[in-house]
Image (tube, grey):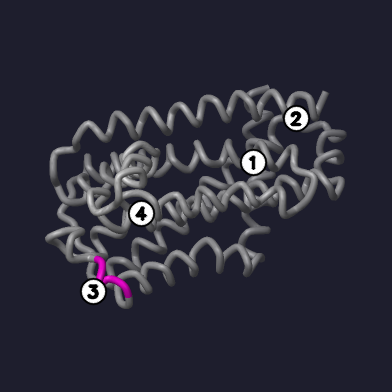
Amino acid sequence: MSTHLVSDTAVLTARSLKHVTRSMDTIITTAIVPIAMMLLFVYVFGGAISRGASSGTYVGYLLPGILLMTIASGISYTAFRLFTDMTTGIFGRFQSMPIARSGVLWSHVLTSLVANLISVAVVFVVALVMGFRTGAGVLAWLAVAGILVLFTLALTWVAVIPGLTAKSISGASAFSYPLIFLPFISSAFVPTNTMPGPVRWFADNQPVTPIVNTIRDLFAQQPVSGDIWSALSWMVGILVVAFALAMVIYRRKIS
């Protein structure tokens, strides 16, 4: 059964990835928009807002938040693709075929992971062109990659829930808007100590700030603070709760 599940999931993942490469809207939203925002903040706003942000380059300060925004933008399409499969009959047709029943769901999760990591890599290359430099070692790079993978998986399982339960296309993808804007009220663009009291409290106690701070420390070759435990707690907690809820909904759909 495990071999059956793996092979079926691989075939269905290849199908979903092919759809991604044929969707110009997906490519623009998940790669071009984050790059445009990075260019805007560095070259238009950066001169005014970077003075209190860091002693290094502003693109180096900004990059961790842009990477998280890239992933948040990308996972909305996971809900969109899953909803489309549900409402166009493809989902039901797959379930009537002699294939692993959970392969359909896992293929969307793996497609989200692969597509988002490719988008992150593209954004990172542009950041290098804009002047981002890091002397991070292998372990630091592995830690950054692990954080981005865990963040992607956590948000992807969140996206699965509206993908299975939404009543409309807009409802399936609307959940991602708060996630995309969450970095704006965090340490992604400026230090939180520049914010007024209630806003600073929210910024310091929401999941984006500790994740951004940890990635920033790793890129800067600085010892990571206690933010790493807060970041891991947020990501693992969201992943476990979203996975459990999504699987319950999925089993009801296919029963």
Q: Which residue sits at x=75%, y=30%?
A: 101
Spatial CA span between label 3 and label 1: 43 Å
Which residue has dot 2 on it? 101
Check disc 2: other Cα within 10 Å, few if <14, some if 14-19, many if 20+. Answer: some
Along the line of sight, the residue nearer the viewer: 187 or 99: 187
Which residue has dot 4 on it? 65
Spatial CA span between label 3 and label 4: 18 Å
Spatial CA span between label 1 and label 4: 27 Å
- Label 1 or label 2, whichever comes before in sequence order: 2
Q: Which residue sits at x=35%, y=49%?
A: 186
- Label 3 or label 1, whichever comes before in sequence order: 3
Where the N terminus falls, by quadrant? Answer: top right
Along the line of sight, the residue nearer the viewer: 189 or 216: 189
Which residue has dot 3 on it? 47
Determine the secondary structure under disc 1: helix
Q: Which residue sits at x=67%, y=44%?
A: 11
Which residue has dot 1 on it? 107
Going by the image, does 89 lie left or right of 123? right
